[in-house]
Amino acid sequence: MRIGELSRETGVAVPTIKYYVREGLLPAGRLTSPNQAGYDDSHVRRLRLIRGLMDVGGLSVSAVREVLAAVDSSDESVHKVLGAAQFAITPPSTGEPEGLEEARRAVAELVRRRGWHAEPDHPSAEAMAVALATFRRVGHGAFEEVLDDYAEACERIAAADLAYVGRHAEVDGIVESVVVGTVLGDAVLAAMRRLAHVDASARQYDEGARGVSGGADTP
Amino acid sequence: MRIGELSRETGVAVPTIKYYVREGLLPAGRLTSPNQAGYDDSHVRRLRLIRGLMDVGGLSVSAVREVLAAVDSSDESVHKVLGAAQFAITPPSTGEPEGLEEARRAVAELVRRRGWHAEPDHPSAEAMAVALATFRRVGHGAFEEVLDDYAEACERIAAADLAYVGRHAEVDGIVESVVVGTVLGDAVLAAMRRLAHVDASARQYDEGARGVSGGADTP
C-alpha cells in the first residue's frame, strides 16, 4: 500500500509517518519507483504499536526507539531481551531524594523476603526505592506496611501476565507482547486501582452506598 | 523561617518556591516586615508534597494545583472530596481510539461483575477503556482474559490502601493520604509489577535461574 493508505488505515498523519521513518521507529517502505514506497501489514502493526506506547504508555520518541530495538533483537535469550526491554521502558529516576539508601535497603529486603529472582540494582528496584523515599519525605513512611499486600498482588498479576504471553505469543512475538503488556498494562492497572478505590471508599465513607445496592460485601 | 531556610530544608531552589507561590500551589508566607515573609512547617510539608507529586507522580503544575485544591477543600463528604481528587489526578484520555465503545462495554461489564460501587463514566473507567481499546488495536484483545486476575489484585491493594489510611490519617489528612498514596502508589506498583515480571520471567525462561537459588517455588 502507499503511504496515504497506511495513514488512513492507522489514523496517523503522513508527515508523522515520515517523521517516524526518519527517527528510525518505523522501517522505510520498499521502493516501488524512484519516488514511491510501498508499505505492508507489518508497517500497520508497527505504527499501531508506536502510537499505543506513546499515547497510552506516555513513552517519548527515544524511549519507543529503545523499546523497539529490544523487540527487534532476537539473538539473545528471551529472558535477556525481556530485561533489555524493561530497562528501556523504565523511566530513569529523577534525582536522589533524601533517605534513598534506607529505601534501597527496604526494597532489597522485600525482594529477599519474597524470594524474587531479581537483581537489587534493577532499574525497577531503583524506581521503587525513589518512590518509597518520597513517601517517607512527605510523612508517609508507614506506607511500607502495605508492601507485602502489594507484592502478593503483583505476584498474581505477573503470573497472569506470563501465562497470557505463554498462551498467545508465538516465539518471535513474546517480547512485543511483554512490552505491550507492561506499558499498556500499567495504564489498565492504574485505572483499575482507582476504580477499586472508588468502590472501597464508597463502602467505607459514603452513607448512600452502604447496604443499598447489594455489592459483594452485602450479605 | 525565612525563604532561604525553607529552601535548604526542602532542597527546592528559592526562585522555584517563589514560582509555586505565584502559581497558587504554596500559600504565601506570613509578612514579618514589608520585604520579608516567614514560613513554617506547613510550608515544608506542602513543598515536599508538591515535589513528590511532580517528581515521582509526573504531575504537571496545573494537575498539582487541582489536586491541592481538592486536598484543601473540606466542606464536602470524604467520599466526594476523594472523588474530586481522583478526577484531578487522572490524566484526561488522549483521543478516541477505534473500538472505544466496545471497550467501554467491557469495562462496564467488569464493574458489574465485580459488584463495584463506581460510576461507569468515572474518568478511571474511561482511561481503562482507552487502554483496552489500544490493546485490541495492537492485536492483543485477548488481554481481557486476565482482567479478573487484575481486578482481584486491585481489590486487595485497594483494601490495603484504605486500611492504611484508616490507621494513619487524622480526619483532615485523609484526602492528602489518599492523593499521595494514589500517585506515589502508582509508581510503587508499576515498579513492583516489573520486578515480579523479572522474577516470573527468570523462573520460566532463564535456564540459569531455575532450581538454583532456592526461591519460593523450589521444594
Image (cartoon, coloured by chain):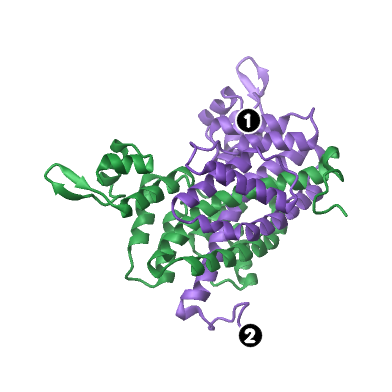
Chain colours: A purple, B green
On the image, numbered disc 2 is attached to which residue?
Answer: A219
Residue extending farthest to the top is A34
Which residue sits at x=14%, y=41%?
B35
Is residue B102 visible from the viewing direction of this image? yes
Mark drawn on residue B3: none
Q: Earlier in the sequence, mark 1 or mark 2?
A: 1
Which residue sits at x=44%, y=70%?
B79
Sort mark 1 into few (<14), some (14-19) or many (20+) by Cα contacts within 10 Å: some
Given the image, on which type of amino acid does mark 2 rest? Pro
In the rendered structure, the answer to whether residue A38 lies left or right of residue B34 reads: right
Q: Position of residue A219 (x, y in %)?
A: 63, 85
The quadrant of the picture occupied by the C terminus of chain B is bottom right
Given the image, on which type of amino acid does mark 1 rest? Glu
Which residue sits at x=56%, y=46%?
A103
On the image, numbered disc 1 is attached to which residue?
Answer: A66
Up/down of B56 relative to A193, above or below: above
Q: Nearer the viewer, residue A34 or A150?
A: A150
